[in-house]
Amino acid sequence: MDPSAFPRRFALSRRFSLGAPSRFTVSPDGRHVAYVTDGALRVMSLDGVERLCLAPEAPEVTYGLAEHAAAESMGRLRGHWWAPDGSALLVARVDPTPMPLWHLGDPADPAKPPRAFRYPAAGTANAEVTLHVVTLGGGRTEVVWDRAAFEYLATVHWDAHGPVIGVQSRDQRLLHVLEADPDTGATRLLHERRDRAWVELVPGTPARTASGVPVVPWERGDTRRLRIGEHLTPDGLQVAEVLGTDGERVLFTAWDGPFERHVWSYGPEGGLVRLSREPGVHTAAMGGPTVVLDSQTPDGHTVTVLHDGEPVGAIRSLVADPLVVPRPEFLTLGGRELPGTLFLPSWHEPGARKLPVLLFPYSGPGVRLAVRARTWAACVAQWFAEQGFAVLTVDGRGTPGRGPAWEKAVHGDQLTPVLEDQIDGLRAAAAHCPDLDLGRVGIRGWSFGGTLAAAAVLRHPEVFRAAVSGAAPSDQRLYDTHWKERFLGHPDEEPENYARSSTIHDAPLLRRPLLLVHGMADDNVAAAHTLRMSAALLAAGRPHSVLPLSGTTHLAGGGTAGQLLLFELDFLRNALNR
């Protein structure tokens, strides 16, 4: 429904990835294409000669694809990587059969058989993942590490100095960076990272410069910087991603202040240079001295080509301008200086009338909504504002871009601190703008934001008078291993963390109107979450509304998305007595 609200399993982060795992790659010399079909890795040359490199030994085994945990939670969408000279590949072998088998049916078509798929729910087994060096001449060598101690293959990179992999323990508190010998498969330790909560996987790391200087994250308290050999990037820039290296130069993105993410270059000759100049949220791709800058700004989407740091061209965007142009006011709210955006109706005159308030958060890991950019979320917020609401978005504890301590404040409890921040942000916004009617406050959200919306009316009915909860994980034990155990630990060892972070246990507390929305074809957050939540509410005698979306996955698109907004608007208007 709202792509901007989702991590990478959709985001530049993580969690909510909008693209499928990569099934093909071109060799660095441009002479071969490796691709996956029916679980087998094949390579085709420019002259059309095709060879089968690796074939699955069993029906569910795949070669060259990312497993569920990697694609959905680690941000690793690939399962094969070329050697720099194009003579060999690193290939992941995935056996998903240890994972539980789930079934996804279509209630609207009972004659259609359900689709079976493997899903690693929290506390259950993951796929078995191994890594192999495969040469174009037919050789094969397994890369060896202690897979019992390091269950997750988190990162893979092959540069001029050889293959480097990052392997992570099941509890995610230990990450080993290993250098692999492509001839023998033996590995040796290059770098180790530990953390009492979890080791955050920074995309693009570890990396190395042309001379072999390591590029790794460096964290302390509220700061995430890059260590490039003996040098640290400056304090105050919260590193988000390493985009690549060119010689000794490192290209990376970092949050600069509460609302903007910029592209930076750092090297021994030029020092630190900010390449993105306009306010916004920026990323880039690099090839030698050429950088393609992809920018979301308050005016829309632009793509600029830079050479040696200077603009030399642009790639035209054909995306249509929205009919509703966002008019956010950027706020820093309360004692914790929460980043927030406030959207008021374009026709509103200050002091003329009180406006009902609609909170529109995601406020979960991997995603920022209160940003200086014309995102889809901002357009939706302004649309609700034009219907007569004051719409407030607050990015609280647990969101990225403000350092490790801020992100890890939700360790063991993903709801209590986040709800506190939403309430504090609401009160601070009302003090700033007296036209906000705190007697008529609603909240809407999707995915993690949907869980937050439900928790708001369940746990704080004195503040929130109505909620729309979309595609919400209501029982955290039903969510997947790497993502959920990162924040809450293993459910068999720390069950209390799952209880305090699951809204299903709060069903008897409902006193306010609650609309539950879920796509029946959702294989990310299964519809079982909402169905079980509804059953718990009914068992407790708590009236509520449920809107099933037939044939819809985790994101509602097309005409369904538009009609859903109108349905939500009608529900909120009735619930808040406008």
Image (cartoon, rainbow, N blue to C red):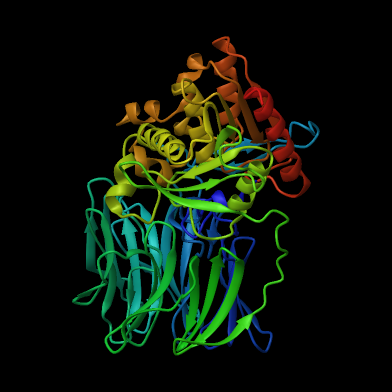
Residue furthest left in the image: 230
User: Vertically, is 169 above or below 564?
Assistant: below
The quarter of the picture where the C terminus appears is top right
Query: In the picture provided, is 406 more to the left or to the right than 462?
Result: left
Query: In the picture provided, is 105 more to the left or to the right than 359?
Result: right
Please indicate, yes or no, whether residue 149 appears anywhere in the rendered image: no
Image location of residue 237, percent across then percent down: 32, 65
Image location of residue 269, percent across then percent down: 29, 89
User: Vertically, is 504 above or below 175?
Assistant: above
Q: Residue at x 47, y 25 (%)?
A: 463
Question: How many marks are shown on the rendered structure?
Answer: 0
Which image quadrant is residue 356 in?
top right
Near-viewer residue (550 or 481):
550
Image location of residue 481, percent across then percent down: 42, 43
Near-viewer residue (397 or 114):
397
Which image quadrant is residue 230 in?
bottom left
Please indicate, yes or no, whether residue 67 appears anywhere in the rendered image: yes
Near-viewer residue (307 or 212):
307
Image location of residue 151, percent across then percent down: 35, 52
